[in-house]
Image (cartoon, grey):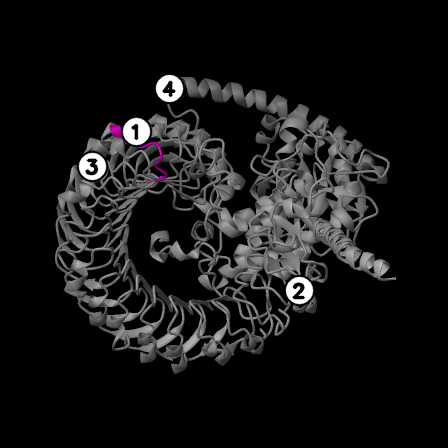
Amino acid sequence: MSSLTDRRRTHLPLYLLFLLVCLLSTAAADEFQILLKLKSTLQASNTNNNIFNTWNSTNSVCSFTGIACNENGFVRDIDLSNQNLSGFLAADAICQLESLETLSLGFNFLHGTIKEDLNNCVNLKYLDLGNNLFSGSFPDISSLSRLEHLHLNDSGFSGTFPWKSLGNMTGLIRLSLGDNPFDQSPFPTEVLNLNKLIWLYLSNCSLGGSIPKGIGNLTELINLELSHNNMVGEIPSEITKLTKLWQLELYHNQFTGTLPSGLRNLTNLENFDASENLLEGDLSELGFLQNIVSLQLFENSFSGEVPTEFGEFKKLVNLSLYKNKLTGPLPQKLGSWSKIDFIDISENLLTGSIPPDMCKMGTMRGFLLLQNKFTGEIPANYAKCSTLKRFRVNINSLSGVVPPGIWGLPNAHIIDLTSNQFEGPITSDIGNAKMLAQLFVNYNQLSGELPDEISKATSLVSIVLNNNRFSGKVPGSIGDLRHLGTLYLQSNRFSASIPESLGNCNLLSDLNMAENSLSGDIPSSLGSLPTLNSLNLSQNQLSGEIPKSLASLRLSLLDLSHNRLTGAIPESLSIAAYNGSFSGNSGLCSTDISSFPQCSSGSGMSKDVRTLIICFSAGSAILLVSLTCFLFLKKREKDEDRSLKEESWDVNSFHVMSFTEREILDSIRQENLIGKGGSGNVYRVLLANGKDLAVKHIWNTDPSDRKRFKSMAPVLAKRGGKLKEFNAEVQMLSSIRHVNVVKLYCSITSEDSSLLVYEYMPNGSLWDQLHTCQKMKLDWETRHEIAVGAAKGLEYLHHGLERLVMHRDVKSSNILLDEFLKPKIADFGLAKIVQDTADKDSTHVIAGTPGYIAPEYGYTYKVNEKSDVYSFGVVLMELVTGKRPIEPEFGENKDIVSWVSSMLGSRDSILSMVDSYIPEVNKEEVIKVLRIAILCTARVPELRPSMRSVVQMLEEAHETFQLLKIVISKDSAAADKKMKVVKGIEN
């Protein structure tokens, strides 16, 4: 018996070891299944470098990419941050990993809500869900008492945040909850007890009230950010107890009073931003912050002089004091000892001369001193500042000759010297300014001829030289500036002729050369400028006839008055919009404008010749009239016969009509033309009952035929080759009833004619409102409503009909806006219905507009509904950035999608893309919409969301709570060295 007992005792450890191995194997298998479930809820957008490629049964879970295990082989860390993942968070599965300490999913595209299951991750020490697209409120996480790092910034959560759950997290070191539209609440008292905190980021999360005095208890803080909230009151003096502070950001609140006494004690402070508040008083407390790197106090009411101690700062990189009430001179040593990158002290009352050495270290990129009272000359040292990108000293009292090197700064994007008293010429150095896009020197006393070398500044988009004393000829080399959009030369002393080469500037939209001494003919090449919007050549000495080519332009402003022009005013320019455009030209005549004499073609002939011609013409006319009358009577008999037959005109009505086809046909005239689409001309028709309609005539004749007739009625009698396109559009549109799809009232067809009658959209297209002179300054609410409405229209086409309908030409000019700026999808001239029995993956119809066409079309010529999604993503980028799909600034062969992609390196660069018309307070939501646009424009079609998903994400992105401004993303793992881009550098 004893030997049996001994054997059992000997084998017992083996049994236990076997049991332990079995348990470990079972646990490992369980963790494998848990991670597979996590994988099933997430999708990676990069198929070539998919983070989940290693997540398979041939590998242990500990070798999965993004997974780390503890010494016992259990999953300890999940780090899938910044992997472009979409999907939702399966917290119920993840929290079954009992040893999990780190869960990092930041910087992805995760959406949906977070459930209470997250509370089961009781061993978590590090939780990062920031920079995602979640929605709904964040759950109470009181059970996560071991947390040391909690990062939820810019995650999309809203509602009431469970501040009380922070009370259990006494070990918290970093807390980042900013950039979320939570319900407004006072500063949470629970945070004041977290005395181990070194990082507190509560910017842009709807905090109200004042900063409590208890903030002085958080003595370990190195970073305190409370910006972009609704906080009021004075900055408490207790904040000066936080002597370890490296960064203090309080901007965009409503703080009042002066800077607290004792602020000089924060000797470790490197970044201080209290801009966009109601602060006042002087800046004397700041003169002792010798370690300051970035100081931003713009848009307050600070007064007094800039402390002389600022001139001794050795680490200063960024100084923004614009829009205050500062007076006196700048310290003359400012920048002498530091590597200044950016300085903006605009819109103050500063006087004296410009300090000479702010670019002494050769690092300055932004130099903005505009709207002050500076005097004297520009110091010559700045001509050597090759790093400068923005040089703006406009609206001061500066004088003297501009140092030659200023004109040729090799990296400058903008040079603005407007409204000073500068003299002298623009020198040939300007040929070295290869990056220069905007040159503003108007309202000075500059003189001399423009150098031919200006053509070497090939990036120029705007040249504004008006109201100076420039003379000589306008250099023909300007025609080499292929990106030029604005050329203002008015109110100078230019002479000679207008260069014919200006017709090469295909992007030119505004040309003003008025009030000079220009002579010769108006170049006919100007009529070939496809984007020209305004043309002012008034008050010169131009002669000759008005080129007929100008008739093809669609100008919002035309002024050729007070010249020496002769001959006939082109008929298409003789309209009410151009009243006064030709006055002061005694040699002009017109058949349509009563204030000008009637044109006579025989004014240069002798009397005998004219008499002979008149006699011959009279005899011929009598014969011709007789013949015409005979033919007319015969034709009228046939026409009247034909008009009695119903089949002469086929009216297909899809709604109750209050008009006849004759009302429509009689209104198809040149003066009613309002647009030219990809498949036809569009006319505005005003009915007798006061209602407006839009009528599209499919182009089915040669353009030369249309030009011969004032009325389009004769043209409509010509048979075309677009009947197939017309029938496709009618067939599809007649079945559609949706508030966000343009309404088709009827089609009117005959043996020879094709017309579509739509509801009229008084506010034109989204393109018009974003990119043309008709544009309004659309606020973000309106832009978002347009995005959602247009998305719903496409969703209906893709998912709301029995058969899928692809648009094939989604673009901003095909999104029309009604009187309330509500969007409607239009122009299905190239749309086709995809039959259920057809190849679902593709069709081979050529369609689309450059800049909107999905990349797969370039190498397969195959498109499906995901191609519409791509195009809609481009429209979203237009709404966010205000830029066209193709802009010169994007670079050669680049479009808006590649440009946006290139700007995603940091939060700062993302912010710089947002349209300046969009208020700062809305940029939180704007960035979310930009992320949706990025999803829509994925290169792989399968990775693009459906339009149904797009609508859902857009609606989730739009918070019904108070909208707040976006600020710099604070990714806690990398934010220690990030600094916010100054608002002024974007101005």
The amino acid on which the numbered mark 3 sits, given as a three-letter code, is Ile
From mark 4 to mark 2, how far is it between C-alphas? Answer: 94 Å
Q: Residue at x 58, y 36 (%)?
A: 710
From mark 2 to mark 1, how far is it between C-alphas? Answer: 57 Å
Quadrant assignment, res 590? top left
Residue 843 is covered by the magenta coloring: no
Q: Residue at x 83, y 38 (%)?
A: 835
Circles 3 and 1: CB atoms closer than 8 Å: no
Which circle marks residue 606 in the picture?
4
Mark toward the start of the polypeptide (4 vs 1): 1
For the magenta stretch, what is the residue range? 453-462
From mark 4 to mark 1, how far is it between C-alphas? Answer: 54 Å
Which circle marks residue 426 in the picture?
3
Mark toward the start of the polypeptide (3 vs 1): 3
* Residue 743 in view, yes or no: no
Quadrant assignment, res 636? top right
